[in-house]
Amino acid sequence: MVVATRIVLSLLCVLGAIQAGLTFDLRGHFSSSSYAYAAFGIITLLAFAVGWAVGGLVGKGLVRGFARVERAAQARSAGELTVGAIGLLVGLMIAALVYIPVHDLPIIGNWVMLPIALILAYLFAITAALKYRGILRLVGIHTTGEDGDRAVSTSTLVDTSAIIDGRIADIVRTGFLAGGLVVPEFVLKELQQVADSADPLKRARGRRGLEVVQDLRSDIPVETPDVDFPAVPDVDAKLLKLAKERGFPILTTDFNLNRLARIQDVQVLNVNDLANALKPAVLPGEQIELKLIREGKESEQAVGYLDDGTMVVVEGGRSRIGQTLDVQVTSVLQSPSGKMIFTRVADESES
């Protein structure tokens, strides 16, 4: 893009220099035609150099502008872009009608039309894009979504915690996730920062997360859109903004992000909630066989673990740590971070 812009502007400047030379008849200003041709050549070279320099600046500006337009387009739905484009055309048509009375104004008539056309085109385009669902409903096209106001997406937005956790790979292989996954560039950048951390543990987690993203591509479509919100510094806030704009549910293991998403009415798929839901149900009064591993926090408590990792607290079991025995369930505590089972030694409950 930059090279092409430089070439085009350089050629335009050279053509302009040639036209200027012919118009002002440089040969009439020099005593010798050879001097005239030399001056003509120098002016042409200078014009080419100016065009090349200015073309570089203009080309870089165009590249940045196109990149911003591309990112903005990726963050918008097809319906929003289509209705916005129609709004732009309507704005330009109204500007053309306004031109009829305005261009007859003395002095400012022609000059004021350009800003009027730009303002009208912008206002109609942005209004149509913001209200595109209502406009589509007016013409008989209904977007599917919760309460008719949010578009349903077949893709799932994935946050950094769910990638590092790693269980997402197993969930994908089971086929429970419909559609594809969306891992935005700002999430990949956060993973890269974790992978480059000076802390060995964080570095290992970051590298594991990058490997998980790479492995997921072989099992499910994974999009990595170059979408960013520079005015939003926090990655979680960027995820919520993207999810709200494009109707994505968020797959996460982050408890705080889970709560924020629910407050903002964004659908959340919490891996921990799924894991807890799939654990075998344990009811009060039921007996289970358990090996006591370590002491509990309270006096006379011992702790063991089920095969799925659920922690079991045994009242009165501290003196029998290291043994495998039957315990009776007294209560079950369910929290977003996991399930905890409280029990007592079975023979004590029966005595």
Image: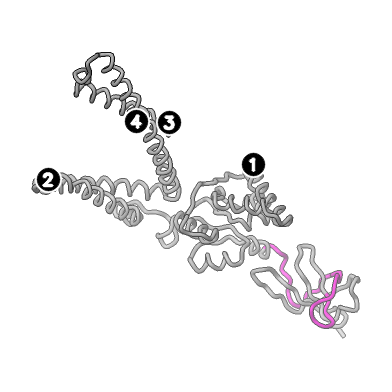
Where residue 242 appears, as percent x and y from the top left, is 48, 56
**Depth-wise, is mark 4 or mark 1 nearer the camera?**
4
**Depth-wise, is mark 2 or mark 1 nearer the camera?**
2
Q: What type is the residue that disc 2 sits on?
A: His
Which residue is nearer to you in this view: 103 or 222? 103
Quarter holding the N terminus is top left
Q: What type is the residue that disc 1 sits on?
A: Ser
- According to the image, label 1 marks what residue? 218
Q: What type is the residue that disc 4 sits on?
A: Leu
Horizontal side of 41 relative to 115 (left or right) equals right
- According to the image, label 2 marks what residue? 103
Q: What's the residue at 25%, 51% (across, down)?
A: 119
Dot 3 or dot 1, earlier in sequence: 3
Under circle 4, the secondary element is helix
Dot 4 or dot 2, earlier in sequence: 4
Which residue is nearer to you in this view: 92 or 139? 92
Q: Which mark is residue 9?
A: 4
Dot 2 or dot 1, earlier in sequence: 2
For the residues marked 4 and 1, what is the alpha-carbon distance in whole angstroms? 46 Å
Where residue 78 appears, as percent x and y from the top left, is 40, 47
Residue 234's place in the image compared with 109, above or below, is below
Dot 3 or dot 2, earlier in sequence: 3
Quarter holding the C terminus is bottom right
For the residues marked 4 and 2, what is the alpha-carbon distance in whole angstroms? 32 Å
Q: Is residue 62 magenta?
A: no
Q: What type is the residue that disc 3 sits on?
A: Val
Under circle 1, the secondary element is loop
Callout 2 environment at 10 Å: few (<14), some (14 to 19), or many (20+)?
Answer: some
- According to the image, label 3 marks what residue? 3
